């Protein structure tokens, strides 16, 4: 995985900036780092981040707000519990009012 280290770190730089109570998508991160067709790789980076305390992987979901990465968290509902503790409602594994909670790195991070 050494060849992915730089990519993963660029993903983590963005993920660390997602504010409390907000979410972004794998695709939005991929687009921001200039790898627009690499949403799946962003997902792999999020999965690999679970050993890092400073990467809020629970704030990264799929393009329609589904908690597609939830099975990578310990316990059955940890991803949902973390989001709900930040005031983000989840129903049937999907962010309620996704557009309201969505944080777009393209609009919020100055390069």
Image: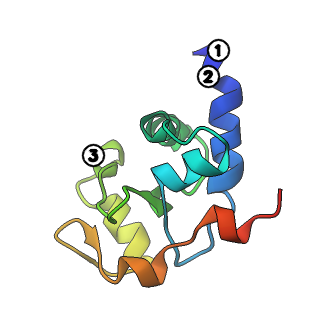
| Of pointers 1 and 3, the one earlier in the residue sequence | 1
Quick check: can you spot residue 105?
A: yes
Horizontally, is 76 left or right of 107 in the view? left
Pointer 2 residue: 4
Question: Which of labels 1 and 3 is toward the front?
Answer: 1
Residue 2, which numbered label?
1
Q: Residue at x 53, y 36 (%)?
A: 45
Q: Position of residue 96 (x, y in %)?
A: 30, 80
- In this view of the protein, which residue sits in the foreground, 102 or 67? 102
- In this view of the protein, which residue sits in the foreground, 62 or 57? 62
Q: Look at the numbered discs 2 and 1 and tell me whether their residues touch, using CB distance below 8 Å.
A: yes
User: 10 Å neighbourhood of mark 3: few (<14), some, or many (≥20)?
Assistant: few
The image quadrant where one finds the C terminus is bottom right
Quick check: can you spot residue 54?
A: no
User: 10 Å neighbourhood of mark 1: few (<14), some, or many (≥20)?
Assistant: few
The image quadrant where one finds the N terminus is top right
Above or below, 49 against 84 in this view is above
Above or below, 44 against 107 in this view is above
| Of pointers 3 and 2, the one earlier in the residue sequence | 2
**Figure quadrant of residue 82:** bottom left
Label 3 sits on a secondary structure element that is helix
Above or below, 70 against 8 in this view is below
Give the CA separation, mark 1 to mark 3.
Answer: 25 Å
Q: Position of residue 93 (x, y in %)?
A: 22, 65
Instruction: Tell how many labels.
Output: 3
Give the CA separation, mark 2 to mark 1.
Answer: 5 Å
Q: Residue at x 47, y 50 (%)?
A: 26
Question: Which of labels 3 and 2 is toward the front?
Answer: 2
Pointer 3 residue: 71
């Amino acid at each position: 995985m050494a060849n992915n280290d730089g990519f993963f770190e660029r993903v983590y730089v963005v993920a660390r900036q997602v504010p409390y109570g907000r979410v972004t998508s794998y695709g939005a991160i991929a687009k921001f780092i200039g790898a627009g067709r690499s949403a799946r790789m962003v997902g792999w980076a999020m999965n690999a981040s679970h050993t890092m305390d400073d990467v809020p992987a629970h704030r990264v979901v799929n393009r329609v707000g589904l908690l597609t990465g939830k099975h990578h968290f310990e316990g059955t509902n940890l991803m949902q519990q973390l989001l709900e503790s930040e005031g983000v409602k989840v129903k049937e594994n999907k962010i309620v009012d996704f557009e309201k909670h969505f944080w777009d790195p393209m609009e919020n991070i100055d390069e």
